[in-house]
Image: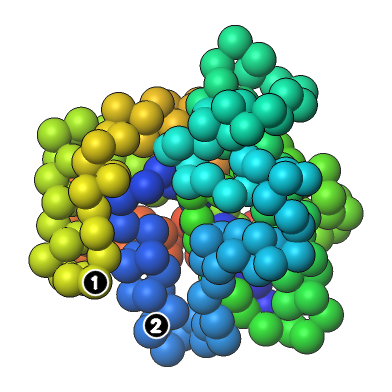
Amino acid sequence: MNFVYLIGGPTGVGRSTIALELSMDPVLHVSSIIGTDSLREVLRRIIPGDTYPPLFYSSYDGHKSLEDGWESCDFHRSDPLICAYDEQARIISIAVAAVIERSFIEGINLIIEGVHISPRHIRKLLKPEIIDLIGEAVLDIENEDLHRQRITERQLHSPLRDVSRHLQYFGNIRHVRDHIVKVAKDYHIPIIQNVDEKNTVEQSRRVLSENLGSRK
């Protein structure tokens, strides 16, 4: 019985680290980890910037796409940042759904992690029987100071990663975080507070195990 595990959450909460830890669990037999940032980069090579400006910004500064003349927004019209983030998530969800469907055809275990994991959009693109086979969780850091600290620490662990922009837009990151948490609650998706890495890995494994157990 293969699985796809979707791990969402805002920038800087440790999604990729937790996904990597889970992938090394010999019991889970994870074949691959895919980040939505990678899927976004592929889409950027296919879709011209003047056709879909939001795709060419980060999740925390997508509101700048409105300055490029982009006006389409189905939701959150009064909140440009969330409007642009939601549009990014919508287009990236097309790629996420395709990867999910392919993984079940090939019978492989897959973890997809990213800030653009959007249950509202992904579920619209998948058949109900596939949705039932997906495990979902959202990583979060509720404490704002701890969240900022984790972002700062990323520079130490990944010297090539410039976190200055993340700190510059930290308020926006928290705003997107609030939206992601709200959507997770709306869809009854488990929210895991990543305060302690070891505990987070255990909780994430438990969420997946409970999902797999519910299929029996």
Q: Provide the residue designation for mark 1.
A: 160
Q: Residue at x 53, y 29 (%)?
A: 63
90 or 107, which is in the foreground?
A: 90
**For numbered disc 1, what is the local secondary structure?**
loop
Dividing the picture into quarters, in which one does residue 60 lie? top left
Say which of marks 2 and 1 sits in front: 1
Extreme-top residue of the structure: 78
Disc 2 on helix, strand or loop?
loop
User: For the point 76% across and 57% down, which residue is it?
Assistant: 47
Q: Give, as a three-letter code, the residue at label 2.
A: Asp
**Mark 2 surroundings within 10 Å by alpha-carbon count, few (fewer than 14), some (14 through 19), many (20 or more):** few
C-alpha separation, residue under disc 2 versus residue under disc 1: 27 Å
Q: Residue furthest right?
A: 127
Check the image and report above or below for 52 versus 30: above
- Residue at 69% x, 62% y: name it: 43
Q: Label 1 is placed on what type of residue?
A: Leu
Q: Position of residue 71 (x, y in %)?
A: 72, 24
How many residues crowd around disc 1 within 10 Å: few (fewer than 14), some, or many (20 or more)? few
Question: Residue at horizontal 74%, vertical 55%?
Answer: 48
Position of residue 122 measured from the top left corner of the image (x, y, whole percent): 73, 48
Q: Name the residue that disc number 2 marks.
A: 25
Q: Nearer the viewer, residue 98 or 28?
A: 98
Of 139 and 41, which appears nearest the observer? 41
